[in-house]
Image (cartoon, rainbow, N blue to C red):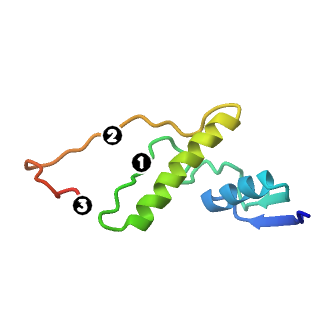
């Protein structure tokens, strides 16, 4: 038998909001509080100029976490009324030619 809780989350940053979303999805009653408006207009996560990466060199743990995050964001985009994650590509600039292994 599943147990459902009333959960209070203090802080509406990216960790608080994503925790609230997932806990709500699991059937818990979630209340999210922050000292400012949500979304906070001056928060670093508010604008649309973000970049994410899945390359962490030899650290496969973080690479695997990012690949899981990409799948999770795609799932949220399908479930929510409008997408919040937009994959648009990337641009790489270098002052000398790239060599094998130079991005690791």
Q: Earlier in the sequence, mark 1 or mark 3?
A: 1
Q: Is residue 91 left or right of residue 50?
A: left
Dot 2: what SS?
A: loop
Q: Which residue is mark 2?
A: 90
Q: Residue at x 78, y 61 (%)?
A: 33
- Check the picture and name the quadrant holding the C terminus: bottom left
Q: Residue at x 73, y 61 (%)?
A: 34
Instruction: Kindly indicate whether the residue at mark 1 contacts the one at mark 2 (C-beta within 8 angstroms).
Output: yes
Q: CA distance from mark 3 to mark 2?
A: 17 Å
Q: CA distance from mark 1 to mark 3?
A: 18 Å
Q: Residue furthest top?
A: 82
Q: Is residue 17 left or right of residue 8?
A: left
| Residue 8 spot, x, y in % from top left | 82, 66
Sort mark 3 into few (<14), some (14-19) or many (20+) by Cα contacts within 10 Å. few
Q: CA distance from mark 2 to mark 1?
A: 9 Å
Q: Is residue 100 above or below residue 9?
A: above
Can residue 4 be seen from the camera position used here? no
Q: Earlier in the sequence, mark 3 or mark 2?
A: 2
Dot 3: what SS?
A: loop
Pair 3/2: label in front: 3
Q: Which residue is mark 3?
A: 104
Sort mark 1 into few (<14), some (14-19) or many (20+) by Cα contacts within 10 Å. few
Task: In this rendered view, identify the residue nearer to me: 12 or 103.
Answer: 103
Q: Residue at x 83, y 59 (%)?
A: 31
Task: In this rendered view, identify the residue nearer to me: 48 or 21.
Answer: 21
| Residue 37 spot, x, y in % from top left | 71, 51
Pair 1/3: label in front: 3
Q: Which residue is mark 1?
A: 51
Q: Residue furthest left?
A: 96
Q: How many discs appear?
A: 3
Q: Earlier in the sequence, mark 2 or mark 1?
A: 1
């Amino acid at each position: 038998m599943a147990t459902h809780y009333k959960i209070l989350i203090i802080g509406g940053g990216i960790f608080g909001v994503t925790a609230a979303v997932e806990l709500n999805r699991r059937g818990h009653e979630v209340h999210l509080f922050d000292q400012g408006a949500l979304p906070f207009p001056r928060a670093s996560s508010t604008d649309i100029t973000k970049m994410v990466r899945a390359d962490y060199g030899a650290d496969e743990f973080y690479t695997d976490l990012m690949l899981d995050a990409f799948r999770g964001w795609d799932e949220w985009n399908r479930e929510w009324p409008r997408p919040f994650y937009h994959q648009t590509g990337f641009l790489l600039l270098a002052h000398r030619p790239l060599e094998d292994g130079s991005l690791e």
